[in-house]
Structure formats: C-alpha cells, structure tokens
Image (cartoon, grey):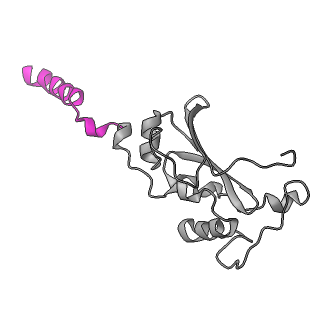
C-alpha cells in the first residue's frame, strides 16, 4: 500500500518542480524585430511600397517596385487626396514585424512617410519596447529622419509606439 501512495506524491512533486523554461518567456527573453522601423520614417511612398513588396511580399497596386520616377503632385490645401497618398501597411502582415504587433498604421504627406504607429498586443515597459523594436533610449539622440518617438500604454493591455518623421502639415498650416 505504501507503494500505491508514494506514486501520486512523486508525480505531484514533479509537477511542482517543473523547470521554468516550460512557462512563457520573460519579456527580456523575447527576440527583437529584424526590421529597422526607424528607417521607414520619411521614406518616399514609392520606396516604401517597394520595401513592402520585397520584405513582406505585399504588392500595392500603385506603390510597388515597378513605379519609376514618382513625384507627388498633391498640396495640403488644394490637391489633398494626392498629397496624402501612399501605400497602407497590409493588416495581414503586421505580426511579421514582430509577434507582438497587432496593428500598423502609416501616414504619408507630400510623398513621404510622415508617421508610423504600431499597436502591440501586450503592455510592456518602455525600455523593453525600445529593445524589441531597435529604438534608441530616451537619452540617446534620435536619427535625423525622426522628430519624435512616443511609447505609451494603450487599451487595457496594449502598448502603442508612434514614430514621427516630420510635423503634420495640413490645410490650416
């Protein structure tokens, strides 16, 4: 009878001492992205479209590697549709940037990527976000093509990253 009782106790001991590697990884164990998202800031709409095609397998109908000699013909107060034109980041490819990315939004002005927003599906400390997305620390200088980097909590359990290449220029400016 003692053999019968010791078996359940032994199995309980094994469950209680499972190695920590079986649990979900700690934030610092998560690998960073392979994409230098800061380099997207101020990229031309044509170049960004070609980038999407080469790196994510998404070919925008207009802004792709076949587009040559693109010149934006828009104006912030007159030809606004053309002024703000550019490829959208494909929703189905967001997690290809990183498994934590749930949504990506890009905005173009005058033919250049004005801003980039990433919504993460997890709330993370700012330092970890900077590590995972290859962003400089808040103490380090930003690259010349970036005017602002913002990292904040969004939603109940998310983190939002906003990268601005240049100030928004609208019809009222």
Say above or below: 38 vs 160: below
Q: Where is residue 77, by image quadrant?
A: bottom right
- Image position of 92 (left or right of 61): left
- Image position of 61 (left or right of 50): right
Q: Does the magenta stretch include residue 10?
A: yes
- Image position of 52 (left or right of 168): left
Say above or below: 170 vs 26: below
Look at the image and give the residue range highlighted in magenta.
1-24
Residue 8 picture location, percent across and down: 19, 25
Q: Is residue 58 magenta?
A: no
Residue 159 picture location, percent across and down: 55, 36
Which residue sits at x=59%, y=28%? 156
Residue 60 picture location, percent across and down: 69, 68
Which residue sits at x=89%, y=60%? 79
**In the orientation shown, which residue stands out farthest toward the right?**
78
Residue 68 picture location, percent across and down: 70, 79
Q: Which of 144 and 126 is in front in this view?
A: 144
Say above or below: 159 vs 76: above
Count the labels in the image.
Answer: 0
Which residue sits at x=53%, y=52%? 95
Q: Nearer the viewer, residue 10 or 128?
A: 128
Q: Which of 140 and 153 is in front in this view?
A: 140
Is the magenta region chiefly helix, strand or loop? helix
Q: Where is residue 15, by image quadrant?
A: top left
């Amino acid at each position: 009878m003692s053999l019968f009782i010791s078996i359940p106790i032994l199995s309980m001991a094994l469950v209680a001492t499972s190695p920590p590697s079986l649990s979900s990884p700690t934030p610092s164990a998560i690998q960073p992205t392979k994409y230098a998202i800061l380099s997207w800031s101020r990229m031309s709409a044509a170049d960004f479209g070609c980038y999407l095609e080469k790196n994510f397998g998404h070919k925008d109908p207009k802004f792709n590697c076949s587009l040559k000699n693109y010149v934006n013909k828009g104006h912030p107060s007159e030809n606004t549709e053309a002024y703000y034109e550019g490829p959208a980041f494909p929703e189905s490819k967001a997690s290809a940037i990183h498994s934590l990315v749930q949504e990506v939004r890009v905005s173009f002005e005058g033919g250049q990527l004005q801003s980039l927003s990433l919504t993460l599906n997890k709330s993370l400390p700012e330092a970890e976000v900077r590590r995972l997305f290859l962003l400089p620390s808040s103490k380090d200088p930003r690259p010349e093509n970036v005017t602002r980097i913002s990292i904040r909590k969004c939603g109940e359990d998310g983190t939002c990253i906003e990268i601005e290449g240049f100030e928004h220029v609208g019809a009222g400016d």
